[in-house]
Amino acid sequence: LQGAGCPGPTPLQGTAAPRGREAAPRAEGEVLRKSLRRGVALSTGSFVLCEALRLISGSAEVHASFKVAEVIEQADYLYGSGETEKLYQLLVQHKNSEDAELLWRLARASRDLAQLSITSAEEKRQLAYDSLEYAKRALEKNEANSAAHKWYAICLSDVGDYEGIKVKIGNAFVIKEHFERAIELNPKDATSVHLMGVWCYSFAELPWYQRKIAAMLFATPPTSTYEEALRYFHMAEEADPNFYSKNLLFLGKTYLKLNNKKMALLWLSKAKEYPAHTEEDKQVQKEALELLNSI
């Protein structure tokens, strides 16, 4: 107890005390015992308080996790129902979230809203930049999230449309890296595989003047072929058959570029007959019909 506010040994220790002073040590001992009991009581009280705070904190974390899971469940239902505007309104309320799963869904919802024909040009631009920011934050929260990589790449590509050809071509390297990382993390995600195919298709059909600009700007500009694009589109279809109208459309368009009209007719017909659940599906149907009529 020495050093804890209690007196240490004295020169008189072990010496008989006068009778009149005999009660003093008992009194001191009683005070000491009371102090110790009070100290234990305080320590116990502090422990109980800390435990209570810990439990409250843990409860808050569980509640927060439950709330995020609930929002994600609602979001996935709205996404599956094609309720683009309602989905965005639900998720944008949580734009300051720290959850990667929620943030990449917000990036996707913002981009989907920008794709709607009713969205003004000014709003489309703002949504493009907002989407990229949400996807970037999702990656910061969880680098190992496949969907975060996928949507970061998509949104970066969209922003490139507003930044000019030099930035767009420069971004292409980063975009490819993120699609490849998304596929590495989740090889069964047909959408990421499809988008890698779109990347290849885009650079395979790059106009000559853009190729020239790219060669001037970069020592080794991004390149690809229709054969490579076709391989990714088929891989996506194998991973999840008939999962996306645009994959069917790109299969048809790629076969057209390779002068295989028989296979082009097959895939374009599938794209035309694909059930139109979204505005994008309707646009795919329209383009597929136009291409079929041109063959």
Image (spheres, grey):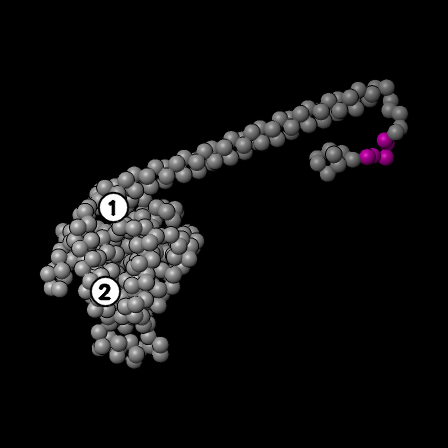
Examine the rendering and report whether any part of residue 173 can be seen: yes
Q: Nearer the viewer, mark 2 or mark 1?
A: 2
**Quadrant of the rendered structure where residue 253 is?**
bottom left
Which numbered marker is on residue 88? 1
- Badge 1 amino acid: Tyr
Which numbered marker is on residue 255? 2
Q: Position of residue 140 (x, y in %)?
A: 41, 54
Q: Are marks 2 and 1 in contact (CB under 8 Å)?
A: no
**Residue at figure coordinates x 44%, y 38% from the top left:** 61
**Residue at figure coordinates x 17%, y 55% from the top left:** 269
Q: Identify the magenta region.
A: 9-13
Q: Nearer the viewer, residue 252 or 49?
A: 252
In the rendered view, would you say 76 is above or below 171? above
Cα distance in 3D space between marks 2 and 1:
36 Å
**Residue at figure coordinates x 54%, y 32% from the top left:** 51
Q: Nearer the viewer, residue 224 or 23?
A: 224
Label 1 secondary element: helix
Q: Nearer the viewer, residue 90 or 231?
A: 231
Which numbered marker is on residue 22? none
User: Farthest residue in the left direction?
Assistant: 293
| N-terminal label among 2 and 1 | 1
**Residue at figure coordinates x 45%, y 33% from the top left:** 59
Label 2 secondary element: helix
